[in-house]
Amino acid sequence: MAIIVVIRKRDRGFSSLLLLNFFFFAIFSGRFISVSALNYTKYRQVGSLRLARIQRHLDKINKPPVLTIQSPDGDIIDCVHKRKQPALDHPLLKNHKIQKSPPERPKMMRMMKEENDGVRRENRSSPSEGIAWQMWHQKGQKCPMGTVPVRRSTVHDVLRSKSLFDFGKKQRNSLPLSRRVDAPDVVSGNGHEHAIAYTGASEEVYGARATINVWDPAIEEVNEFSLSQIWVLSGSFDGSDLNSIEAGWQVSPELYGDSRPRLFTYWTSDSYQATGCYNLLCSGFVQTNSRIAIGAAISPVSFTNGNQYDITILIWKDPKLGNWWMGFGDSMLVGYWPAELFTHLADRATMVEWGGEVVNSRANGRHTTTQMGSGHFAEDGFGKASYFRNLEIVDSDNSLSSARDISTLAENTNCYNIKSSYNNEWGTHFYYGGPGNNPECP
């Protein structure tokens, strides 16, 4: 049995997204599967056998919840018992015991109040701190102690990807920019463009930190994305054993079905070939926090010449147990990537990258209008351009220090660019981004 799915094409930025509100049902394995308003740009056939395979996969990653929370933005957040979360399905984690003792935090961290969830707002005249939540918290709901919030995946989410295998994964052409062997993406046609700062190669690095302001960049095509993140890297950049741990914010209509900026994580131990995934869409990342849902929307966001909202992300290796932890703000622990997942990163990292990345599909025979960061170039500065500030590195003594010796790189500065600087308040920092297509970027 084949089912034809009909969806209207969406416009730039998805501000006036048109969806057909209809339902169809496929019967298999004695149950109904409802699929509605799929975010496609073309007609497509979906067979019942494919739907059955998708549902079996969803049954594996959507664990039975203790409590379910409906977010105002349409997300469904399942509160799953910690010991039943997707991470522990990984074959390398069969005997893994969730780390209960807090990791040893890097020294010289600027501590904030414990209740700060990591989002800060600033304006030109009087910087002030403010607490902000992800959108699923807006009605005051939260997950019970002993559970972790997991964004539920749907049939719609899988069908927006190329295949079930590709669901939740980056493509291999997402290799970090600074050590790529092939020509820049703009020339090679891989479609990924960057504006990044990075450390020197072959250093001994045990973590990195930065504060990143959050925007809602416009995305032109459903299969394009715009993200701002930290990469912690080790291994061969020209082989198949690159290890990467990544975290930041991302707008990806294909992955999430909307154009909201979302907190995300990623990992791979084989250069994006088969291992790893975004968020909790495969086994691996062990979540310990009951307040932060990875993959959920961030709110509020920065706006031009107004308040600037940013998030602080720290990734570091626990010197005692060797797991790579993710911190949000200066006090909250989100979870960790177990050392068992990695080869090179089981020891240490050799490079860190900070910055933005977009996909340029050139769907209309020209450069995409998908924005990086705020959509403003770096020279537009505070209140307009996106920034990373207080770039820091964790050294072998588990101490944080300012990342002084960095380089910057962008493939096409007429489309997206980056400018770094240093001062006492923001330490090493940079502005970056751009509008994509413009008279100088055809």
Image: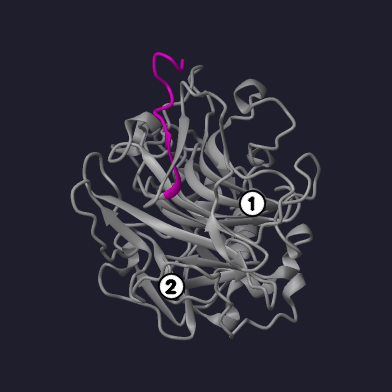
Image position of 417 with respect to 320: above or below: above
The percent coordinates of residue 396 (x first, y second) are 68, 65
Q: Residue at x 65, y 58 (%)?
A: 53
The percent coordinates of residue 269 (x first, y second) are 73, 56
Name the kind of residue labelled 2 in the image. Ser
Return the residue nearer the eye: 430 or 29. Answer: 430
Image position of 244 with respect to 280: above or below: above
Distance (Cα) linking label 1 and label 2 = 37 Å
The tally of labels here is 2
Specify whether 254 is left or right of 55.
Answer: left
Specify whether 167 is left or right of 370.
Answer: right
Q: Earlier in the sequence, mark 1 or mark 2?
A: 1
- Asked if labels 2 and 1 touch by Cβ distance under 8 angstroms, the answer is no
Specify whether 31 is left or right of 388.
Answer: right
441 inside magenta stretch: yes
User: Residue 98, located in which quarter of the rendered image?
Assistant: bottom right
Crowd tier of the residue under label 2, counting other residues whose Cα lies within 10 Å: few below 14, some 14–19, many 20 or above: some
Q: Residue at x 49, y 73 (%)?
A: 333
The percent coordinates of residue 402 (x first, y second) are 52, 54
User: Residue 299, located in which quarter of the rendered image?
Assistant: bottom left
Crowd tier of the residue under label 1, counting other residues whose Cα lies within 10 Å: few below 14, some 14–19, many 20 or above: some
Image position of 247 with respect to 85: above or below: above
Find the residue positioned furthest to the front: 424
SS for callout 2:
loop
Report the span colored magenta.
427-442
Mark 1 lies on residue: 164
The percent coordinates of residue 320 (x first, y second) are 68, 78
Q: Residue at x 41, y 27 (%)?
A: 369
Name the kind of residue labelled 1 in the image. Leu
Mark 2 lies on residue: 331
